[in-house]
Image (spheres, grey):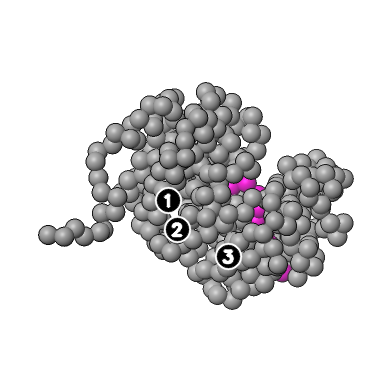
């Protein structure tokens, strides 16, 4: 298959390596000529992907028309803030029925739309899908066993994505729950910021387990209110992605939170991480979605106050712990 990967960051590059491993004809595009030059020159020494090698067969280009010359599938791997701009830019080049696989994670703050919805806005003639799950680029690029889920409205689209990406070290499941997959992937980054803060404060396993468990409860409540399915939030793109992002040394969201927990400002933390911290970009949108759908999101609320209202992390944690007493699961029935 001929596949175009738009976005030459760590995830786009890792997926280009994977697709080339699967014998596809791969072109990877970046809007930054300097990034293209560096990646093409340093194929065996890729920034932020230690030990990975970009195959000689992969074409690296800054020419969008060259990148989109008759592909059979497009992978949208640009940062979430550039998804609409990129989709708008390529719309006239996309034929009806083209499969576009979104692999970025986030919610557009201005519209509160998921990224597949953003792409559908700009390219209504395409079949837009999502690929998400616990999958750090650093590990995928080195063939470390990984499982992930492909979400699409039509089964044949999800099956085609599964066939394109799956191999002996990268297992792909399919699902029709596109909204649930996307929300799990974007909202877990907000919780991962909070998990990093706990590590930065030097707190223990009990605290992080509590945060992750109540975090998935918030993600599930909001996700189901928006039409997602419970099974999705208990699966790879929900609990699975949350676990890896909250605990891994590779997680830029967790690492940014760690620096904040150690006393750095959010701006200083993002600068030091030196990569896009999607949790910061998604935090405001997540809070607004909670208000829109009248869903209580106490962790998301406190993360927003720390990020944007200069609230101290210790005060935020204290306020979470002394909230009004409540049941763990309100749907469960007590005996009379």
Reading the chain from its start, which is encountered first: label 2 or label 1? 1
Q: Do the residues labelled 2 and 3 touch (CB within 8 Å)?
A: no
Indicate the position of residue 45 as horizontal and vertical percent values: 83, 44
Viewer-proximal residue among 114 and 20: 20
Q: Do the residues labelled 2 and 1 touch (CB within 8 Å)?
A: yes
User: Dot 1, crowdedness within 10 Å: few (<14), some or many (≥20)?
Assistant: many
* Side of 208 where 141 appears, left or right: right
* Side of 112 where 137 appears, left or right: right
Task: Based on the picture, tell me whether residue 252 belongs to the magenta stretch.
Answer: no
Name the secondary structure under disc 3: strand
Q: Name the residue under label 1.
A: 216
**Whether residue 112 is situated above or below residue 280 in the rendered picture:** below
Q: Name the residue under label 2.
A: 233
Name the secondary structure under disc 1: helix
Of circles 2 and 3, the one toward us is 2
How far is mark 2 from mark 3, CA to CA?
14 Å
Viewer-proximal residue among 85 and 320: 320
- Residue ranking furthest to the front: 205
Reading the chain from its start, which is encountered first: label 3 or label 1? 3
Task: Based on the picture, tell me whether residue 75 belongs to the magenta stretch.
Answer: yes
Q: Mark 3 points at which residue?
A: 150
Q: Quadrant of the C terminus?
A: bottom left
Q: Quadrant of the N terminus?
A: bottom right
Residue shown at 70%/48% (left/top)?
138
Count of numbered circles on the image: 3
Q: What stretch is highlighted in magenta?
A: 72-81
Name the secondary structure under disc 2: helix
**Whether residue 18 is situated above or below residue 260 in the rendered picture:** below
Of circles 3 and 1, the one toward us is 1
């Amino acid at each position: 298959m001929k596949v175009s990967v738009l976005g030459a960051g760590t995830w786009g590059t890792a997926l280009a390596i994977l697709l080339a491993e699967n014998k596809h004809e791969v072109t990877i595009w970046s809007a930054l000529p300097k990034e293209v030059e560096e990646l093409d020159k340093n194929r065996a020494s890729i920034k932020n992907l230690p030990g990975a090698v970009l195959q000689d067969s992969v074409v690296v280009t800054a020419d969008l028309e060259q990148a989109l010359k008759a592909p059979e599938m497009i992978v949208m791997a640009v940062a979430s803030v550039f998804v609409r701009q990129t989709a708008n830019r390529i719309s006239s080049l996309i034929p009806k029925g083209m499969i576009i696989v979104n692999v970025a994670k986030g919610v557009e703050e201005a519209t509160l739309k998921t990224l597949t919805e953003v792409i559908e806005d700009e390219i209504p003639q395409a079949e837009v899908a999502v690929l998400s799950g616990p999958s750090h680029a650093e590990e995928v690029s080195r063939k470390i066993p990984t499982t992930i889920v492909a979400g699409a409205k039509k089964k044949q689209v999800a099956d085609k994505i599964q066939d394109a990406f799956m191999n002996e070290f990268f297992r792909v499941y399919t699902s029709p729950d596109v909204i649930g997959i996307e929300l799990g992937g974007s909202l877990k980054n907000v919780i991962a910021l909070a998990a990093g803060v706990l590590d930065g404060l030097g707190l223990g396993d009990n605290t992080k387990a509590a945060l992750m468990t109540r975090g998935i409860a918030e993600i599930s409540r909001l996700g189901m209110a928006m039409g997602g399915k419970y099974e999705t939030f208990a699966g790879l793109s929900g609990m699975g992605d949350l676990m890896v992002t909250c605990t891994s040394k590779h997680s830029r969201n967790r690492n940014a939170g760690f620096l904040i927990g150690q006393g750095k400002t959010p701006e200083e933390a993002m600068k030091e991480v030196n990569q896009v911290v999607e949790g910061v970009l998604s935090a405001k949108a997540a809070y607004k979605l909670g208000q829109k759908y009248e869903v209580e999101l106490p962790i998301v609320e406190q993360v927003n106050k720390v990020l944007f209202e200069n609230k101290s992390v210790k005060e935020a944690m204290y306020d979470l712990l002394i909230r009004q007493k409540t049941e763990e699961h309100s749907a469960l029935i007590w005996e009379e």
